[in-house]
Every structure is written in structure tokens, then in C-alpha cells.
Image (cartoon, rainbow, N blue to C red):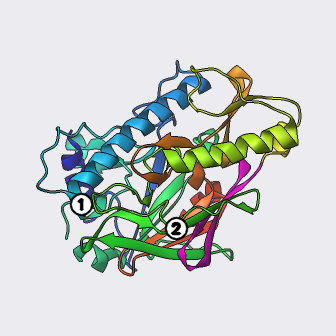
Amino acid sequence: MSPLNLLIYFSLLLHSSYAQPTGEKGLSLELIHIDSKRSPFYDANLTDFQRIVRSIDYSKSRVLWLESMMIARANPTAIRPPLHAMPPAIFMVAIGIGSGHGLRNYYLHIDTGSSLTWTQCLPLRQLAALTHGLFSYCLFPPAEAAHASFLRFGHDIKTPRGGIHSTRIFEFDGRVGFYYLDLKDISLNGWRMNFPRSTFARHSDGTGGFVVDSGTATTQLTTHAFDRVEYVMKDYFRRRLNLHPVNDSSLPFRLCYKIVEGIERRLPTMALHFRDGADYHIRQSSLFTNLAERQTLCFSLLPGNNISILGAKQQFNTWMRFDTIHNKLAFAPHDCVRDAAYLN
């Protein structure tokens, strides 16, 4: 089934008996990780290393698709090659259409890189009347794929206690389209990198900018920004841990180190500094990937071409709430596995 048809079914779902909105105009849908046994993409023959490589390959393909979409929206009259099909996202929801023997199940990919997911068939305004323009999720690591988390709308959204920051979502060409944030700077282990103001700015041709996308496996930075972060990261490992990068082109990440005893207790953290003083902290477990089969630890960010993206891995165990009426993103650290308890 085509992505467009799946989006149509998602719109139908909002008025179906399969996942009824609550009396307070809310709705919750269970999230399924791509590597969960309940996922249609689950392959029991894959090793953990192969699963990571697969998710990174999907991520790279998805970024190319996102870049093509962004440039196309900014240049609607330009001639360009056909877009490739959108690759699988990291999380999905399962829905049923029909009843009895006519019941069929479909898996919808969760794409928060674009507001089109919620507005393809219902005008962001009709949907807002149902959900007050609010949706939220809390993603968990693949190791917790046996547990459940939820994509929530409207009054079904539960707010964590304390630690909440919020920043503005930006519109371009009079519409949101993609969820752009104003990233001011990056810190590594508390040290501000002092990027030039224009580093993460969006350009009139549709390139540049910093977006939130749960469908992209891991965060990517434009090449110039990534090179600076990589340089500081190498310096940290050399000075603090006396370690040098491994040279292995078969690894899915660009910067990797051989695992030594105690390394995971001495890893740096990262913070993204957004407009309105909203600091988004990335823990060591989200900043690095342990490739146990290769006895290697890798820096989980990737270099990109035209845009910078906050991907799913760096959103793990962070509560995210999008307010599409007031164009605000709120976030806070949270144990996302506990989100399942909210359904009761």
C-alpha cells in the first residue's frame, strides 16, 4: 500500500472504532520499534550489528528523501529528478480497518519530520478541533523493544514532572511543513563550541536549517558542523582517554574507538542550545553506540549534506510534545518505558 493511502487510513482512524478518541478529545496509539518482534520488518536472523547497519542505511536514505522534499517545497517551479520512495521509519503504529472477516491490519510509519503526516487528508484546523493541535511521544531504545510506548494526541498527553523546556517551531512560506528549530550552538561536556550564527540557519533554496525527525535513526549535522564536533570529540578522547580512532570502513559510523575497560563511565555528554534558552541534553547512551560484536564504541552522529536533523536515537528517553497551533516544542528527560503505565 502506498504511503498516501496509509495516510488516508490514518485520517480515517481518527474517526474509527479501532482507536477511539477519549471523551476529552484525546487519542493514544502504541508505538512499535522497527526491530520489535511485532514489526513487519523484524528479521530474527539479523545480529545486533546488522540491525544497526540496517537502521543507519534506512536513515541515510530517509535524509536524502527529506532533503529532496525540502528543496522541492522551496523551489516549486524548478525541474528536478523524481523523488525516491520514502524508506521505512524507525517507529510505526498498527491499525485495523474493517471488522470481522474483512478486518485488515496496516502499519503506519511515524514521520514527525513533516506536518504532512497529520494534514494530508484532514485540513493540521479540523484535526486541531479533535486534538487541540497537540501530539506527543516518548521513544525508547531498541533494547526496550519488548515494552510499549505511545503516540498521544490532545488530552491523552501526560506531562512529566519538572525539567521541561520549550522552544519555537518555525514556519517558512507561511506554513510549517517541517519542524524547524532555531539551534544556536552546541556544547560538548559543558564546553560551548561557539558556532557562527548562520551555521544552522535555513536558506531560501530549502537547504540548511535544523529539524526534528523521529523517522531518522540518528542525528546528522551538515558536514562543516560535524567536522568541528568530530575534531573536538577526537581531542577529548586523545587527551582524556589516550585513545585514537579505529580505521574500519565497514563500520556504520565515521568516528569509532576500540572498547577499553571503564570507557563508558568516562564518555562526554552533549547539549543543543535552542532559542528561548531551551537546552536539550543528550546522554552518553544516546550519543554513542556500543558495537559489541566488533568491540567498538562509535560516536552516533553522522555528517550530512544539506540539513541538520535531530534523529530518533538522540530522542530516546526524552518526552516530546508538539503544539502545532502555537508552534512550540516542549521536551524533558523521561523514562519512556514507564509511558505504558499512563494508559491504565
Q: Is residue 276 magenta?
A: yes
Amino acid type, residue under disc 1 in the picture: Ser
Q: CA distance from mark 2 to mark 1?
A: 40 Å
In the rendered view, would you say 255 is above or below 335? above
Q: Residue at x 61, y 41 (%)?
A: 300
In the rendered view, would you say 70 is above or below 330? above
Amino acid type, residue under disc 2 in the picture: Arg
Could you say which disc has been placed on residue 148 in the image? none
* Start-end of magenta stretch: 268-284
Q: Secondary structure at mark 2?
A: loop
Mark nearer the N terminus (2 vs 1): 1
Q: Which residue is mark 2?
A: 197
Q: Is residue 112 left or right of residue 172?
A: right
Q: Residue at x 38, y 72 (%)?
A: 170
Q: Residue at x 64, y 63 (%)?
A: 194
Q: Which residue is mark 1?
A: 11
**Can you give x and y, in whole percent of width and height, for residue 331 in the image?**
57, 69
